Image (cartoon, coloured by chain):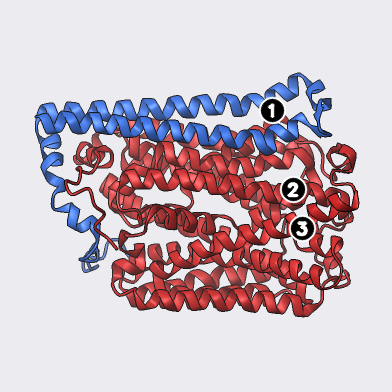
Amino acid sequence: MTPDEPDVPRRVRVTAPRTAARVRGASFPVAREMAEQSEVGQLFVASLIRSQLRLALVVAGGFLVILIGIPVLLAVFPDINAVTILTVPVPWLLLGLGIYPLVISCAVLYVRSAGRNERRFQDLVDDD
Amino acid sequence: MTEALGSRALELSPAVGYSALALVALSTVLIGIYGLRISRTTGDFYVASRTVRPWWNASAIGGEYLSAASFLGVAGLILISGVDALWFPIGYTAGYLMLLLFVAAPLRRSGAYTIPDFAQARLDSLPVRRVTSMLVVVVGWLYIVPQLHGAALTVRITTGLPNWVGPLAVVVVVTLSVVTGGMRSITFVQAFQYWLKLTALAIPVVFILVRLGSDGAPVTGGGSAFTADLNTTADASLYGTISLVIALLFGTLGLPHILVRFYTNPDGASARRTTLIVLGLLSVFYLFPTVYGILGRIHTPELAAEGAADATVLLLPGRIFDGTAGDLLSALVTAGAFAAFLSTTSGLVVSLAGVVSQEFFQGSVRGFRRAALLSALVPLVVALLTDSLALAGSVGSVFAFTASTICPLLLLGIWWRGLTDAGAIAGMLVGAVLCGGAIAATALLGDGGNHWVWLGQPALWSVPTAFVTMVLVSRATSGRRPASASRVLARLHTPEPRRSDGADRHP
């Protein structure tokens, strides 16, 4: 750990020559450079980032409200603890089973919408 | 706790334990060697040359993520805390939702190998890289220690061998497979181990439920399994629950061994697909430890009082079945548990070795091997010198720590143009000091019950403080914004171009 030493060898980023990432890397810059350098392109990128962030925040916010809502609800209405379905109390069912479909639905919703945002961006860039 | 366990008579025949451990160790090394034959370049070593398909990759992520805390700890915690323990698997799973929403695709597109690589590329600053590297190494080591404690418990319970054998065996197997095969072989090993862990929990539980059902024996004791009277811990407070959920949700974002997995996806969209599959795999998996925990509350309740709750999964099949059937099912869960320590430890060792070798050994393959050795030996020494806590709880503290340090760096780095190197360092240090201090204070003062819960579960205040510090210091030092910020952000968020042939290039 000698950050000030001048002769520390520069780190070299190594990628295997036969990776798909590398192969595709060659065709990357066309859309990307354009998006980065033209003013319109920068606007497109900024709006893509904004819409992706908005989407992520909405999905995360909705999920968190429901998730945090459960312990709050149980704390406010402790009677729920006594309700059982087939001898299993409702809080156990809710937390042991009910949350997981919710998580997956949120994820599917997000993956679809994020992909749609990206396709819209690509259409804009390709048209240009 | 160790004394309580040491005095326990061995319930299982040692041959069961030995054969299960030997089987898992052997298959891990064999798959590692198979991987060696196709692992040739430095890229293969670090990120499997980024040509791992979503299903493989998702299985590998699941295999790597489901640690001792998940395999043994969740059931153990349900045994002692009842319904409150269910928040752990929820947090462990939903953490991937946060990862999917905020991190998965942009991080893959960043093109960096490790979190420090990302920090340097984004902020164009060597000091940020250094601080991030140190935090990653600390997190990794802290996370390996409970795995080794779990290994000590499992080996002791199943074979009666002394405490040091389990950790040593795990470290030897992991170091061998990492040093020979690197990331490519580890991907196969991890993917295999997810399915092994799932099978190891699912088959015994099906047998147990069928047996209990046909005997008319109580499965849930007519609901008595769910009463809070069985709990040996105080009910969690609302604050404690919310703080834990925050720690688990946002801690997953910062786990180094999980992040490095995302670089093995070919592009951003497949990184998202992978995460989606992971969520499915985890949701299915966590049903099983939950069932074990509930059955344990009826059939092995005395383990809670003995402080051996984490052994519930290991001992339950032997309690329900006698003779050969019991031995076989016990061997299966033992194998699954051992797979859990092996896969999480090897994932952590690979990612730590990646960071350490780039920092100190110029990132060569030989440096990677040396770094792997170093990454495994330090936690081994710590694990041998310390006593184990409840597995799920000690892993929870690591999540709180990453949520307070690495998570703000990633979230703000990916989504906010205004982040500066000074802000990033200040935020990470504040988070590390607050959260680390709270965890250390709790360890020293002991668990003071709900009165001190704000200290024992620091995430609810330490994570926001780290974020706010990072934002405020970045604002104050806005002159230090890297010139490349807009370009890097564009790279993180613009999709890869469409492929005209539509076919996958890689084998």
Element carrying mark 1: helix
- Return the residue at label 2: B291
| In-image side of A76 versus A8 (left or right) | right
Pick the quarter of the image with the N terminus of chain B.
Answer: bottom right
Which chain did the image draw in red?
Answer: B
Above or below, B443 relative to B354:
above
Looking at the rendered image, the disc whose residue lies closer to the viewer, 3 or 2, is 3
Badge 3 crowding class, 10 Å Cα cut-off, few under 14, some 14 to 19, many 20 or more, is: some
Chain to which the residue tagged by mark 3 belongs: B
Residue in the picture at 75% in, 70% down: B328
Question: What amino acid does circle 3 point to?
Answer: Phe
Q: Residue B422 versus residue B255: which sits nearer the camera?
A: B255
Looking at the rendered image, the disc whose residue lies closer to the viewer, 1 or 3, is 3
User: Label 1 to label 3, Cα distance in Å?
Assistant: 34 Å
Mark 3 or 2, nearer chain start: 3
Q: Quadrant of residue A46?
A: top left
Question: What amino acid does circle 1 point to?
Answer: Pro
Chain to which the residue tagged by mark 1 belongs: A
- Return the residue at label 1: A71
Above or below, A78 relative to B75:
above
User: Label 2 to label 1, Cα distance in Å?
Assistant: 21 Å
Whether residue B476 can be seen here: no
Residue B141, image x, y percentages? 54, 62
